[in-house]
């Protein structure tokens, strides 16, 4: 199939396209996108591990993402860097995002969730994904950016969703570099609108960084980054990275959690106060409905993979939804079984946050947010799905999202009577 048609098929229905390729060609196949090198996808845990081993030499995760993300996160992002610059940034981000540190955000996350849940409509259907994005955006603004000024918060609330929507859209992310200059000069096209939004957001963030340098301290992530050797541009890029990697993705994972739970009454009945089981449910949701679909490497040396030699200059990476259905790694992969995450060590084939050395630095924060927000929702509301049919997956910006945004009807939970 010509690359242009493969690209169109990917943008129209990526999950169905990849499943058809898997049925036709098995665990390894090549897809060609217009304007980009060919990409080899693998669908087993064993082959995915071989790709991730190129992190030790032969493959570059930063270079693989640069064409699609640098316009949004910048040239100094842990997502787009490689080699020593990447390692310097990764070591800088590890302390404020390790599990022990993010645990201190528990009560703040719960308070933000409770505040936003109180505004939800009762008795009529609405989409959970937008509501989850509202909560995760507030968490980013308050706990990552550390912004307290009501005016700045309001402006960022207004600007950031549009920045993510335009910058992460397929029309912008897959726009070849040679076309970005001309497209950026046309104000009504998506890339031109993105550039205007990016300039407004950058002005706010640089203003906040300069203000905070004059008054150091704080428990938010920005406050901790200001204590490092990163300059203003590097800090801006990492703040936007945490927004992109921790806002829409976490919100989509939460939407999938409720989409699954409302169709699994036995699982829902054990929640929300069984903490180990809640953690296992979150991990099983991310197995059966991973939000990010790939974790590519750009090869700078040939890679022997699945009986083929993949040439330098091509992309290689796992298609995560199919790796998570590899029966060699996850027995009975079609079943929703949280118990698989209670019965022994976690499989390395579980990769909703990527794998290898480039495992997502914000994974612990995302998992904490999902546990806390699910608990807060279930403590306050009784949810039902107006349609019990499972929601299909569709490509939404850089995520695989529920096609109907996880439609629910909410009712206030009646408090238990005290004798």
Image (spheres, rainbow, N blue to C red):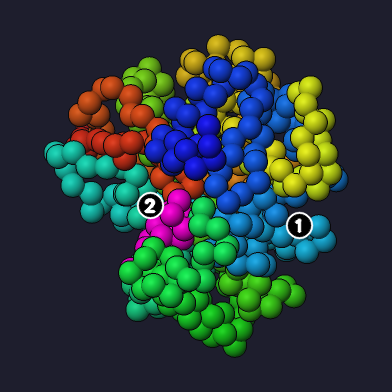
Measured in 3D between alpha carbons, the distance from the residue under mark 2 to the one under mark 1, in whole angstroms, is 30 Å
Which residue has dot 2 on it?
133
| Residue 124 at x, y percent in the picture | 14, 39
Task: Specify whether residue 156 is in view.
Answer: no
Residue 341: in magenta span: no
Find the magenta span and give its range. 158-172
Helix, strand or loop for disc 2? helix
Compared with residue 90, is residue 274 higher up or lower down, i.e. above or below?
above
On screen, residue 175 versus residue 252, left or right, reads right
Q: Which mark is residue 358?
A: none
Helix, strand or loop for disc 1? loop
Which residue has dot 1 on it?
82
Q: Residue at x 59, y 88 (%)?
A: 214
| Residue 347 at x, y percent in the picture | 68, 26
On screen, residue 316 versus residue 138, left or right, reads right
Q: Residue at x 43, y 75 (%)?
A: 185
Q: Looking at the picture, tell me which residue is in the foreground, 277 or 341.
A: 341
| Quadrant housing the C terminus | top left
């Amino acid at each position: 199939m010509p690359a242009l048609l493969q690209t169109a098929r990917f943008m129209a229905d990526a999950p169905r396209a990849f499943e058809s390729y898997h049925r036709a060609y098995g665990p390894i196949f090549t897809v060609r996108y217009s304007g980009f090198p060919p990409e080899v996808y693998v669908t087993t845990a064993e082959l995915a591990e071989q790709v991730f081993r190129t992190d030790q030499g032969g493959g570059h995760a930063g270079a693989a993402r640069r064409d699609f993300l640098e316009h949004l996160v910048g040239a100094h992002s842990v997502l787009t860097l490689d080699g020593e610059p990447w390692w310097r940034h990764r070591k800088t981000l590890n302390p404020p995002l390790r599990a022990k540190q993010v645990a201190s955000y528990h009560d703040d996350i719960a308070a933000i969730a409770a505040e936003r849940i109180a505004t939800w409509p009762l008795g009529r259907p609405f989409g959970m994904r937008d509501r989850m994005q509202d909560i995760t955006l507030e968490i980013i603004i308050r706990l990552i950016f550390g912004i307290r000024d009501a005016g700045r918060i309001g402006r960022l609330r207004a600007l950031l969703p549009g920045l993510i929507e335009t910058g992460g859209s397929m029309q912008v992310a897959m726009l070849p570099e040679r076309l970005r200059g001309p497209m950026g000069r046309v104000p009504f096209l998506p890339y031109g609108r993105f550039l205007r939004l990016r300039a407004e957001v950058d002005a706010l963030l640089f203003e906040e960084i300069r203000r905070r340098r004059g008054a150091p301290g704080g428990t938010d992530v920005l406050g901790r980054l200001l204590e490092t050797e990163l300059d203003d541009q590097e800090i801006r890029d990492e703040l936007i990275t945490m927004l992109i990697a921790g806002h829409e993705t976490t919100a989509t994972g939460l939407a999938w959690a409720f989409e699954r739970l409302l169709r699994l009454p036995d699982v829902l009945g054990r929640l929300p106060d069984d903490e180990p089981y809640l953690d296992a449910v979150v991990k099983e949701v991310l197995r059966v409905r991973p939000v990010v679909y790939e974790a590519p490497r750009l090869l700078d040396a040939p890679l022997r993979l699945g009986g083929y030699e993949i040439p330098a200059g091509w992309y290689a990476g796992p298609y995560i939804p199919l790796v998570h259905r590899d029966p060699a790694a996850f027995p009975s992969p079609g079943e929703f079984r949280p118990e698989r995450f209670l019965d022994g060590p976690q499989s390395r084939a579980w990769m909703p946050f990527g794998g290898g050395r480039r495992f997502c630095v914000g994974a612990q924060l995302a998992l904490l947010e999902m546990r806390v927000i699910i608990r807060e929702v279930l403590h306050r509301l009784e949810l039902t799905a107006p349609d019990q049919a499972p929601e299909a997956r569709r490509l939404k910006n850089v995520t695989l999202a529920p096609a109907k945004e996880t439609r629910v009807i909410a009712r206030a939970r009646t408090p238990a009577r005290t004798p």
